[in-house]
Image: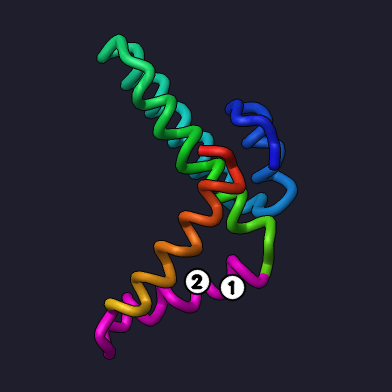
């Protein structure tokens, strides 16, 4: 896991999911703007949290594939999502723990 800084997270995303760099850059811009406007670090903390979890998930291809599969099941709306959502939560919880959040 990279350090929990914007630069380290950007470098990690560039390695594992380069197509997501524009989204990261936009999110960082918005977080910085919101932090300045509200005089709060909360938007920057949210940015770091979101992208640290993303990196923790995506750096394990099997975990990422399973999460994307589960998200597709929920999006399709063809079955009771309770079990699927529980597994999504477990994946995200594991990623948060890995990222030390």
Cα separation, mark 2 vs mark 1, equals 5 Å
- Left or right, 7 with reference to 40: right
Q: Is residue 73 magenta?
A: yes
Q: Residue at x 59, y 66 (%)?
A: 64
Q: Which residue is mark 1?
A: 65
Residue closest to the eye, 78 or 97 = 97
Q: In the image, which disc is placed on residue 48? A: none
Q: Residue at x 31, y 83 (%)?
A: 76
- Expressed as whole percent of the image width and height from the top left, the position of residue 69 reads 49, 78
Residues in magenta?
A: 62-81
Residue closest to the eye, 84 or 72 = 84
- Left or right, 6 with reference to 79: right
Q: In the image, which disc is placed on residue 68? A: 2
- Left or right, 100 with reference to 29: right
Residue most toward the bottom? Answer: 78
Q: Is residue 58 above or below residue 68?
A: above
Q: Is residue 39 magenta?
A: no
Q: Residue at x 34, y 12 (%)?
A: 36
Instruction: State yes or no: discs 2 and 1 in contact (Cβ < 8 Å).
Output: yes
- Expressed as whole percent of the image width and height from the top left, the position of residue 47 reads 45, 34
Quarter placement of the N terminus: top right
């Amino acid at each position: 896991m990279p350090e929990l800084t914007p630069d380290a997270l950007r470098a990690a995303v560039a390695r594992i999911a380069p197509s997501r760099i524009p989204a990261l850059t936009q999110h960082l811009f918005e977080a910085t703007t919101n932090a300045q406007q509200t005089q709060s670090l909360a938007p920057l903390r949210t940015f770091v949290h979101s992208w640290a979890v993303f990196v923790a998930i995506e750096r394990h291809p099997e975990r990422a594939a399973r999460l994307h599969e589960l998200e597709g099941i929920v999006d399709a709306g063809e079955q009771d999502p309770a079990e699927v959502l529980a597994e999504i939560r477990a994946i995200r919880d594991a990623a948060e723990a890995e990222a030390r959040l």
